[in-house]
Amino acid sequence: MKLADGLFLESCREVAKKYPSITYNEIIVDNCCMQLVAKPEQFDVMVTPNLYGNLVANTAAGIAGGTGVMPGGNVGADHAVFEQGASAGNVGKDKIVLENKANPVALLLSSAMMLRHLQFPSFADRLETAVKKVIAEGKCRTKDLGGTSTTQQVVDAVIAKLD
Amino acid sequence: MTMAAFFARRLIGNRSSQILGTSSSTSGAFISIARAFSSSTTPIKATLFPGDGIGPEIAESVKQVFTAADVAIEWDEHYVSTEVDPRTNSFLTWESLQSVLDNKVGLKGPMATPIGKGHRSLNLTLRKELNLYANVRPCYSLPGYKTRYDDVDLITIRENTEGEYSGLEHQVVKGVVESIKIITRKASMRVAEYAFLYAKTHGRKKVSAIHKANIMQKTDGLFLQCCDEVAKKYPEIYYEKVVIDNCCMMLVKNPALFDVLVMPNLYGDIISDLCAGLVGGLGLTPSCNIGEDGIALAEAVHGSAPDIAGKNLANPTALLLSGVMMLRHLKLNKQAEQIHSAIINTIAEGKYRTADLGGTSTTTDFTKAICDHL
């Protein structure tokens, strides 16, 4: 899509010039998905137009553990709203809520992003570290991560790990 | 049925379309005619485009393996010209295109579109002139070639003529561009019919239609409607609709959830490459383009790799597996299976592997190993 995506690329290139210390490259979206699946470590920050971003975010979420763990935020000129990064699967399922199986990690990490945005980095770090410790330990995980814990149990574990 | 139309045409002559009615892809009458003639031993003519770069070497591998397996195919070779043919406005000559239209079946290696303006890209030329409406890519884990995913066994079927790639873009004002996505009932029905027919004839159990109809309610909505309609005709096949973002995530978390996927153009482009990545990349992925009137053009979708051209290093697997798809389309299933098993076993054995698979064999050694495995 030479004109549409072409315009997007032109814009990215213009901005990239202002940040010469940051490596900038371009990749076609189908090749990108293929590379993500084979070697995701080659990517750092990815900026995309709307539809591709949806697909790439969900692909990346799948590789990183699923929508239950991926944080996200929506940023505007005047406001910012933080929510889980990828939408597939963990949304709108009343059954999961009733069974208390929803994974709170994504939203907890999103709130850590919000704290960072509000310039409270130490609070953000504390929250993130606690969450990561709980997941790393592996004892308290909801169903989507292969465990049997309830939402509340995960939250309690995170609180317990906060220093 | 594509195959029936092919045989009917060849052996009865071109009057067949008048005798038997239209050559629509799902006419049941054709199938019985095909069975009557399918034991013919006259060689079938197939167009071969070796392509550029490593193309000629891997095409040579295909010819060798096919000969070793006694496949009754007579290759009609065509090359990309060095000048633009005004009749086609491309580097592909009118004769090349006519050859595929006549033979109804072909195999294509990688072609590098020459840079420059004033002519159509090679792939676009083929697609438009041969009316190739569906791109079919089977993706399955190759035993012996380890990737993060072991249990992939799916087929992506991508609508290849319209959608987001209709080529309709314009600038509204400076800094604002519009791109038009077109979905038609005709094209959606056509690819949906093919997908379900493919699923049925290849014994697949499930067809998933991939879409974003929650947002693009009219375009993807129409595509889904067509899939719904066709699904009703195949009650024995399980049909589901999956939103594209869910699909991406499910594919990387658990690709075994999918069987046959049917998608409009853009999603198909992205998903089929994603799936190729799951099993080892484009160097191992076969594909086949289906056209109106039963045309099938199998092709290797990897690049021409000019840096290793002529060095006997190229991996012919993608082109060979595409050749196998071509044989299955021609209903030469026994030999298709033979060659397919030989390839799988050679790779699984691990003794002969080309550099891209982590081995040290040359193209010729690898080819010979496959022939030995037949």
Image (cartoon, coloured by chain):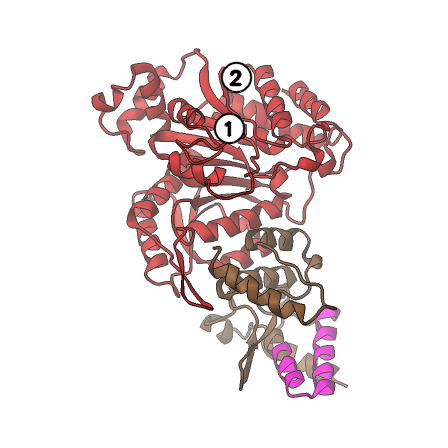
The colour with which the image depicts chain B is red
* Residue A128 counted in the magenta span: yes
Chain displayed in brown: A
Q: Residue at x 39, y 39 (%)?
A: B128
Residue B329: x %, y % from top left: 44, 28
Chain of the residue that carries numbered disc 1 in the rendered image: B
Residue bearing mark 2: B71
Q: Which numbered disc, 2 or 1, marks the residue that appears first in the sequence?
A: 2
Magenta span? A109-136
Residue at 28%, 33% (x, y): give it: B24
Residue at 52 percent across and 73 percent down: it is A99
State the residue in front, A70 or B129. B129
Q: Position of residue B1 (x, y in %)?
A: 33, 30
**Residue hosting label 1:** B107
- Kindly state the secondary structure of the residue where label 1 is placed: strand
The image quarter in which residue A153 lies: bottom right
Label 2 with label 1: CB-CB less than 8 Å: no
Above or below, B33 relative to B317: above
At mark 2, the secondary structure is loop
> Which SS type dominates the magenta stretch?
helix
